Amino acid sequence: MSYASGALVAAAAARGDHTPADMARRMELPYLTVYRWATGRHVPGPAGLAAIQRAYGLTADDLLSEDRAA
């Protein structure tokens, strides 16, 4: 499974949130959690995906995709 952290960062920037700290404030989540998502170090779980959808309108389909073998 691939996680598109760039989509999250772009959606945040479109709303004026240019740092993980800005994003964390909007989502009301710990900075370190959001930092890890924004940098692609961790993939958000169900609760995180719900927070992202509420804050930025991105769905799991927007952020996650199946890796397909060639």
Image: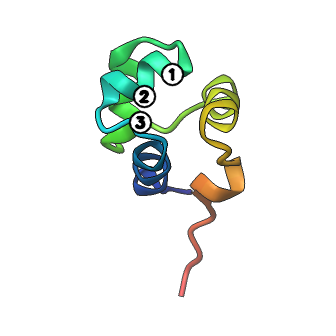
Residue 41 shows in this picture? no
Of the two numbered discs 2 and 3 on the same chain, state the one appearing first in sequence.
Answer: 2
Secondary element at image label 2 = helix
Q: In this orientation, which residue lies closer to the viewer: 42 or 34?
A: 34
The structure's colour scheme is rainbow
Residue 51 shows in this picture? yes
Q: In the picture, residue 36 is in which quadrant?
A: top left
Which class describes the residues within 10 Å of circle 1: few (<14), some (14-19), or many (20+)?
some
Type of the residue with mark 3:
Trp
**What is the spatial separation of the Cα atoms under label 2 and label 1, in whole angstroms?**
5 Å
Q: Indicate the quadrant containing the N terminus: top left, top right, bottom left or bottom right.
A: bottom right
Secondary element at image label 1 = helix
Residue at x 48% of width, y 42% of height: 15
| Left/right of residue 42 with respect to residue 61 in the rendered view | left
Residue at x 60% of width, y 27% of height: 48
Viewer-nearest of labels 2 and 3?
A: 2
Residue 68 point in image, percent of width and height: 59, 76
Q: In this orientation, which residue lies closer to the viewer: 6 or 26?
A: 26
Which class describes the residues within 10 Å of circle 3: few (<14), some (14-19), or many (20+)?
many
Q: In this orientation, which residue lies closer to the viewer: 56 or 38?
A: 56
Residue that mark 3 sits on: 37
Residue that mark 1 sits on: 26
Residue 47 point in image, percent of width and height: 67, 23
Of the two numbered discs 3 and 1 on the same chain, state the one appearing first in sequence.
Answer: 1
| Left/right of residue 56 with respect to residue 24 in the rendered view | right
- Marks 2 and 1 in Cβ contact (< 8 Å): yes
Residue that mark 2 sits on: 23
**What is the spatial separation of the Cα atoms under label 3 and label 1, in whole angstroms?**
14 Å
Residue 5 point in image, percent of width and height: 42, 50
Residue 20 point in image, percent of width and height: 33, 29
